[in-house]
Image (cartoon, coloured by chain):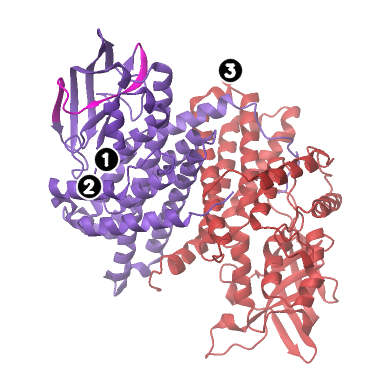
Amino acid sequence: MDLELSDEQVWLSESVTTLLERAWPPPEAVATAKDEQRRRVWDRLVEFGALTIGAEDGLGAAELCLIARALGTRLVSVPFLGSAAVRMAVAPFLERMSDEVNDALAGGVGVSLAQLEPGSSSWFDAPATEARRTGEGLELHGEKVAVEHVEAADWLAVVASLDGQPTLAVLPTSATGVIRETRRSFDETIPLASLRFDGAQLSQRDALAPALGDRALERLGTIGALLAAAEAVGAAGAVLELAVRYAAERKQFGRAIGTFQALRHLLADMYVRHSSGWSTVLYAAASLDDDADDAARNASVAKAYVSRSAREIAHGALQAFGGIAFTAEHPAHRFLRRIVVRERQFGDAAHHERILGAQLATRAGAVPRALAEASLP
Amino acid sequence: MRLSLTPAEQQLQEEVRTFLDSQPHLGRRLPHALEDRIEALREWQRRCHESGFVGRAWPQEFGGAGRPPVEQIIVDQELAAAGAPEFVNVVGLDVLGPSLLRFGRDDQRRRYIPTILSAEEIWCQGFSEPEAGSDLAALRTRAVPREDGFVISGQKTWVSWGQFARWCGVLARTADPSPYRPRHRDISMLIVDMRSPGIEVRPMTQITGHAEFCELFLDDVVVPRENLLGEPGEGWKIAMYTLGHERGTAALPRQVKLRTWLDRLIRAACARELDGGALIDDPRAQTALAQALVAVEVLRHHAYRSVGEFLGGGAVGPESSTVKLLMAEAEQRLAGTALELLGASLQEATPEDAGENEFWEETYLYSRAASVYGGTRQIQRNIIADRVLRLPEG
């Protein structure tokens, strides 16, 4: 048992932060970032090795979470979440997939994840989108919403049903029969689209067979929840830091508002939520890297907690800033928006609490060994 | 980061389990009468110490096992998972022992540490006073210096296990207040023999019905000079170090204990009915249990990370306030969930359920103290605002 970040992990985290500071505008200017800036920072991240996943010496979940947190801190807008989560999800099954997919994922292509459907909840595994068998291949039919960064991603990973079972289908964004429509995004720094699949073709090999597809989706759900949570923790930490700085400078009643206990306690509570939120993400990531039996459960704990606490931190920050936070040019709402968007992916708090609760109810027989009846709390 | 255990750590885990399997104290009701219970608990700690499970990371020359601190984490988790009672000398182990190791002289460590570990001598702490609660530096107990030591007079309160303690770590003023010096610089830490003339202990009954804490009256109690811990005027520094330990490291066994309570609550929810169905099948009950689980797990994950940093050479600093807040939150969330879930069934209990109901009612009442003892929730927030966020002071 070793509970500290390794030197390499600390180095990775610092390097990514430096890279982003150089290549990405500050929070108050993120909305002005051009596609070209997005491409440039993405290229640098890929060059740095942010997508070296799955190989023997590749990045693990803990490292990916460190990167996601750094992206959230700077409100960076790149197709990292989908690209990293999909690579992690299919890593054990790559030899069953086509050379094209293998080449693409081994290289640095961006992957957009097409999961949610009109009216679906934030995580679901009964897609209406279907991969139908034709003579030699598969055809995709259906509709997906809330797909991020389609412009910047050359590949798509689509949650679809194959032979009545959910699986993950991978195909190029440019495939015939993929019709995209730009959609309004709550976080306007993240380009959003809906996709219609009208018989887009892919190789049989690139939609994992049902049993494998199930496992790939489980992995996708676990790593996706962690990356979304890590990014939200990053955004929450950054807006907390801005709020703390503001409280030390802003004067009312002739003194800095950070001297008033009501606000000090609010900020202290925000700090506790942020610090513990990161702890739980990191722990769950480490358990995933350890291949622990409870990795998925730990990810549910982390996503449930951070989904509530990151937004609580953003709310606290808006309160601390007061009126100024409600002006469009102030960056506070950008952090809030990013946090809300990540809350809606890979299961929100209610979703994960439902899962955890059902698990508790079914494993109720398996309790620790003898319990002392008398207790001295 | 690596969560899995090394072969050596696994072996230790096995060792603890084997030991636990051979212990008659486990799974049995402890004696109800307080005196008998304390005796049983002393015996329990003594056996654990003999097997090397108490003070695992404390220096060997003072009776510890001299092993890496991570081993104590493993041991504590095994003990708690098995439902083992908490060590009766908790104040000595978690609060004053670490301070003796850090600030004590060698002769003091040799004298006190071994008997703390074996529970031969129980310790208590004399910090709070009727007029000095959250504002601890306002304490009035005086220790008047004289040639061979000090003469202490004053009143202390919330002295846990004071009626069974042989030694008390007392904070007292050893100098007159001066406008040129902050008031906490006049405070010293003294090791007081509870058998000294002039000591009077009055147990107080808590809302749970137990009498675990006491009032302590000191009337011209003579304390030899050698019983001063650290230097005169260092009491405040020592107390802050002490409280950091109490708040921080105590979280590891605590979270395991909370986990065993959660499992117990789940079993109770399986056994009881709600409007004709099993309580556990109610979706709202499941969500409430899940939320309690999340609180306990987050405490565990955060305690691991802070302790990881602590083991890596960091100090138990203001960060321990975060752990303390999470600890109170998890305990209160869990106990509150029990109260709400079991709800009406606590009221109309059958005689068979009486023991279980009593446990949850007591656990609930006790949980309300979790955000008061060891520094209130508000004081922890103040510490974070001052020393972590470095907000300007008022």
Q: Amino acid at mark 3?
A: Gly
Residue B205: percent from left, percent from top: 73, 55
Residue A304: quarter of image: top left
Q: Which chain is red?
A: B
Residue A108's mark? 1
Q: Amino acid at mark 2?
A: Asp
Residue A321: quarter of image: bottom left
Mark 3 to mark 1 CA distance (whole Å): 58 Å
Tell me which chain the residue with mark 1 is part of: A
Q: Which residue is mark 2?
A: A43
Q: Secondary structure at mark 1?
A: loop
- The foreground one among B149 and B142 is B149
- Magenta region includes residue A371: no
Q: Which chain is purple?
A: A
Residues at badges 3 and 1 in contact (C-beta under 8 Å)? no
State whether residue B24 is above or below residue A164: below
Q: Secondary structure at mark 3?
A: loop
Q: Which residue is mark 3?
A: B276
Q: Which residues are magenta?
A: A163-181
Residue A201: percent from left, percent from top: 21, 17
Tell me which chain the residue with mark 3 is part of: B
To the question of a shared chain for discs 1 and 2, the answer is yes
Mark 2 to mark 3 CA distance (whole Å): 61 Å
Q: Amino acid at mark 1?
A: Gly
Asked if residue A20 lies left or right of residue B2, the reply is left
